[in-house]
Amino acid sequence: MDITKLLLYVTISMTSSMTKGVSSIREQAKEYCLTETFSPQCSKNDVIVMESAIYGRMQIGKCITAKEIEGFEDDRRFLGCSVDVLSLLDKQCSGKTKCEIRIIDLSDEKPCFAGLKMHLEASYRCISVADETRGCVVKISRTPTHIDISRNVCGTQSQPWTLEAPIGQKLVVSLVDLTPTESQNGNGNRCQRMGYIVDRAAGRNISICGVGSREKQLYASTGNAVEIVLDRHSESNKNQRNFPIFLSFEAVGCSDIVPSEDNWLKRRDDVIVIGCYSSRQSWQLNCINGKWVGAIGNCSKDMSKSDHIQEAEEEPRISGKSEVLAIVSICGFTLAICFIIVCIGALCLRRYYIQNKAKSDYRTLNYESDFGRSKELSGQKTSSAFPTHRTGDAVNGSLAHQLPAYSLYLGQGGVNNADNHHSQTST
């Protein structure tokens, strides 16, 4: 797989993320008149969660005409009177795939003048609920998935719910508690423990509490998986007989990208760097709203993979501390080598200086010794060996003048040869 295929993979991943990122299906609030039936319905494995439900005479519209309230527009007993019936519809519809409620059956509620026609204005959404008959391990995506804490198979210590997101993503855990607020007020702000979340990546457990809020975020995981253990005997679970309670799970962030055999990859939090084994090219991607955003080019082939595979494979693993240690080690090794070279150079120079000085002293001593001996011998030969006649004087004077120079180069042997030659000439 080359870099082009990797780019295609990133594109598909981003498209998939955008598709999966669509939240639960929500229905806009609608009016249901007195003679109608409210009948919400969700697809298989989805259940109803009521969002709002108001009964009365709220506004002019489908069920109330302007002519009907002519002259009573400002009278709150004719228009603008209502009562919240959300808990009533939660009890009959929330947690179910479908339900039916005749609006006339709500007539026991009397927020307005008796005898006036009233209507229902309601909205709901469908949420996905994990089917425990398929197992207790659930794969989580960007589309929220829920578990019903009233289920009896999964959620025990021996068989907990296990929720897993793709590697690289994290899980956001929320509580959807449809128990009416007035039913919870008896406990004040005390934590009504329903179980706990096990985050093994963080090494901690987090209590699941319902404290008077219909829907709230409980926890964001450290890793890509958590486990859920439920308390079957809690007071909150007893309320399940009338009002459902769900735990919601949603994957956030960006999942890891699997590099091809020609590329290396390094990730730090929400940043990925992708590089080429065949060159020094690299590109950076940023995780934004669950999508990897950034441009990736093609790897050039101007350098062989074998020349750089070790460098590229090791680069993603190097941490900041390792880089500092490597630089310090290299600098220390370099300084040590430089110090050794300087010491060796100094020793060599010292040896060379000592040797040259010894040779110079030796030559000076020899020269002075030879010159003094030659001068002494020259004086003796001149005074006793040569006659005083004219021709001898000339020869004698010539040899006496030249003898020291001969002695310097010939030494003692040279002087003896010169004396022998002079004796023969005189004879």
Image (tube, rainbow, N blue to C red):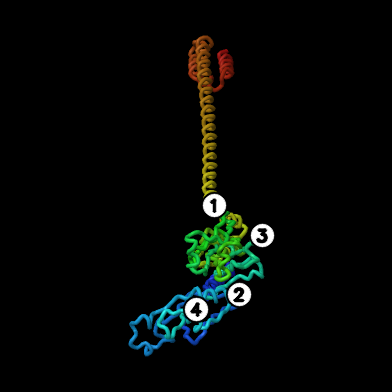
Could you tell me if the residues under marks 1 and 4 are in contact, i.e. CB atoms within 8 Å? no
Q: Work out whether residue 325 or residue 153 is closer to the camera in this orientation and state it.
A: 153
Position of residue 373 relative to residue 278, above or below, is above
The quadrant of the rendering that contains the C terminus is top right
Q: Secondary structure at mark 4?
A: loop
Element assignment for label 1: loop
Q: Within 10 angstroms of label 2, few (less than 14), some, or many (20 or more) residues?
A: few
Q: Looking at the image, is mark 1 or mark 2 nearer the viewer?
A: 2
Tell me if residue 300 can be seen.
Answer: no
Q: Amino acid at mark 4?
A: Glu
Label at residue 45? 2
* 34 up-or-down from 125: above or below: below
Residue at numbered disc 1: 319
The residue wearing badge 3 is 158
Q: CA distance from mark 1 to mark 4?
A: 50 Å
Tag 2 or tag 4, which sits nearer the N-term?
A: 4
Give the spatial CA distance, label 1 vs label 2: 46 Å
Find out whether the residues at labels 3 and 1 contact each other: C-beta distance under 8 Å.
Answer: no
Instruction: Tell me if residue 327 can be seen.
Output: yes
Q: Mark 4: give few (<14), some (14-19) or many (20+) Cα within 10 Å.
A: some
Q: Residue at x 61, y 63 (%)?
A: 232
Which of the two discs, 3 and 2, labels the residue nearer the N terminus? 2
Of the 4 image quadrants, the one containing the N terminus is bottom right
Amino acid type, residue under disc 1 in the picture: Ser
Residue behind mark 4 = 27
> How far across and down, in percent of the image, does residue 214 sit?
49, 68
In the visual, does 371 lie left or right of 230?
left
- Tag 3 near tag 4, CB within 8 Å: no
* Local crowd size for mark 3, using a 10 Å CA cut-off: few (<14), some (14–19), many (≥20): few
Amino acid type at circle 3 is Ser
Q: Position of residue 260 (x, y in %)?
A: 61, 64
